[in-house]
Amino acid sequence: MARFASRADRDAIEGEMPWEARDRAQTIYQFLTRARDRYGARPAVSFQILSGPKDPAQTLSWAELHGRVTQTANLLRRLGVGEGDTIAYLLPNSLDTAVTLLAGATAGIVNPINPLLEPEQIAAILRETRAKVLVTLKSFPKSDIAQKAAEAVKHAPNVKAVLEIDLNRYLTPPKSWIVPLLRPKTPVRHHSDVLCFHRESAKMPADRLMFADSTGDRVAAYFHTGGTTGMPKVAQHKYSGMIYNGWLGGTLLFDETDVMICPLPLFHVFAAYPILMSAIDSGAHVVLPTPAGYRGEGVFDNFWKLVERWNVTFLITVPTAIAALMQRPVNADISSLRTAISGSAPLPLELYNRFKTATGVEICEGYGLTEATCLVSVNPVDGEKKVGSVGIPLPYSHVRILRRTEGRFVECGTDEVGEICVANPGVFEGSTYTEADKNHELFAEDRFLRTGDLGRIDADGYLWITGRAKDLIIRGGHNIDPAEIEEALLSHPAVAFAGAIGQPDSFAGELPCAYVELVAGASLTSEELMEHARKHIHERAAIPKHVEVLDELPKTAVGKIFKPDLRKRAITRVLDATLAEAGIAAHVVAVVEDKRRGLVAQIATTGAVDEAKLKHCLGEFTVAWDWAA
């Protein structure tokens, strides 16, 4: 593996391994074939449907995974899928999900869809991507995925066939005998043919493709961005970006002796690319615990024993999962564990310290986004980790901090905050989204993707995120559009203005909250507004945790709601409540804008204070703070 511990190492890698000159696979199928030839009988992907450390598990070797992908890709072509056609999947994690992802990208354009979305959003994505085939679950106890899929397909006339996967194949008696008795009724019928995924794919040859593989780079995946209600945007990914993410992992982090435990969903780019593609490049072994990953029953309670069972070397995680794990004792031998890799949301300093103390393992925080086929930067495993930063831009990821002045982009200096803009092999220049109008003004200088995130680069080349120009609320890695919350509240006749923002949360990073100004003469309580929000916001994650009525919302000179003031108010409220609950005689006297750190809470004491306790309490949040002068 190449050493990646500093900006100089990054530059050296680029000099020694020119990306354009590399002898690399051009397609996902070539990429996987190379893994089969190199690693053959070694374990590729393992899955256990239940979370117990002794529960049954199934494993595919690299040779077996290659055969299963070949069969499934052949089936998809037999169903009429061409290179430009879309195969969507609405699935939890399993061996079949990994097979579908790789086979879909081989036969056509694969389109993973979040099963937590509502049927109307799922249908909208199916229509936007013009999916011909949907791979989903057969009805299964305690799951509504089959029902959601059936309802969505009713409203997506382009879907010609539905392939059903039965999770019962992963169970053993007596549980496998009980499932048919508890299986929910067959969902409402629709216009599409319904076929058994395993029975049909088993009819196909596993030793060869029945069609010619692609001859070069092309769009091979559609991943939708986070959305709650309304239509999420759909980003396009090429083979080159997918393979680039895998090459990064295989070059900088993993080899065939590594085991990655990944309880993150394969409908998200984090699991699909930095993890699965890195395994293909390196030969590392990926373990998927339960269909729902971290959400699975018993996963947190059994987690350290699963690490011991599989001899895990890399833990793939997000801050909310780390917070939940720190509420459980480390009750197993985890000496195999080398590093935890965290993404999707900012990591609080206190949470980092608690994890390192409890496990003896470092967390490497990274940064990526769907629009860049994921990876952009990471704190180097073998180098200095600046907690709170998202590390050093990866090889061939060129990050610039730009600000727009008089219609042109100007480069920011060291530690100067501007918009984070990225160019790398994962950025599809000019055509990131499937809808052309969504690409308007998305690029700086026609090449650098404007991420919408605000940040700075320090003197050592580390990237720091200080805020978001695009105003999203990120709840535990789940993107929530504040406009959807605001529209729901504005549908009440007594509401004149509504502003939704993310309030700090020690577990999820942010939770949605809203501030409301009523029409003249109206009277409405926060409780009544909360009830209205619950009825009109269909995605539970987007329902605000706090709604407050103000006499007047802060506004700009042109009448737009000025959200920085609302964020300051929310930070003050949440931190004050946390300090009071902990019995700490301190409070927020002001929240100020810092050019380097974003919004900073200034703390003053009102009596004797245990400073260590206060730092521990505030360290649970990603909000920066200082002592008041």
Image (spheres, rainbow, N blue to C red):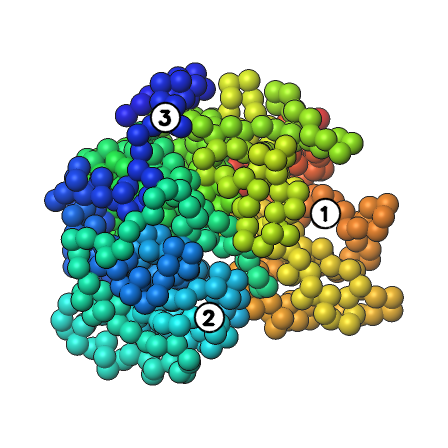
Is 539 left or right of 358, judged from the image as shown? right
Upstream in the sequence, badge 3 or badge 1? 3
Q: Is residue 394 above or below residue 331?
A: above
Q: Earlier in the sequence, mark 3 or mark 2?
A: 3
Point out residue 320 in the picture as x, y percentages from the top left corner: 44, 48
Pointer 1 residue: 563
Asked if labels 2 and 3 touch by Cβ distance under 8 angstroms, the answer is no
Q: Which residue is mark 2?
A: 158
Quick check: 283 above or below 629? Answer: below
**Residue 538 occupies which quadrant of the picture?**
bottom right
Q: Give 443 or 354, whichever is nearer the viewer.
A: 443
Tell me the kind of residue under disc 3: Ala
Quadrant of the rendering where the N terminus is positioned: top left
Q: Is the residue under label 1 in contact with that under label 3 (CB below 8 Å)?
A: no
Under circle 2, the secondary element is: loop
Query: What's the distance in space between the residues labelled 3 and 1, CA to CA?
Result: 47 Å
Q: Amino acid at mark 1?
A: Lys
Residue 458 visible:
yes
The residue to which callout 3 is attached is: 21
Secondary structure beneath label 1: helix
Q: Position of residue 280 (x, y in %)?
A: 27, 41
Residue drawn at x 63%, y 71% is 536
Asked if residue 40 lies left or right of residue 253, the reply is left
Asked if residue 314 can be seen in this view, the reply is: no
The answer to which of 609 and 35 lies nearer the viewer is 35
Q: Residue at x 32, y 52 (%)?
A: 106
In the shown orientation, is residue 304 left or right of residue 395? left
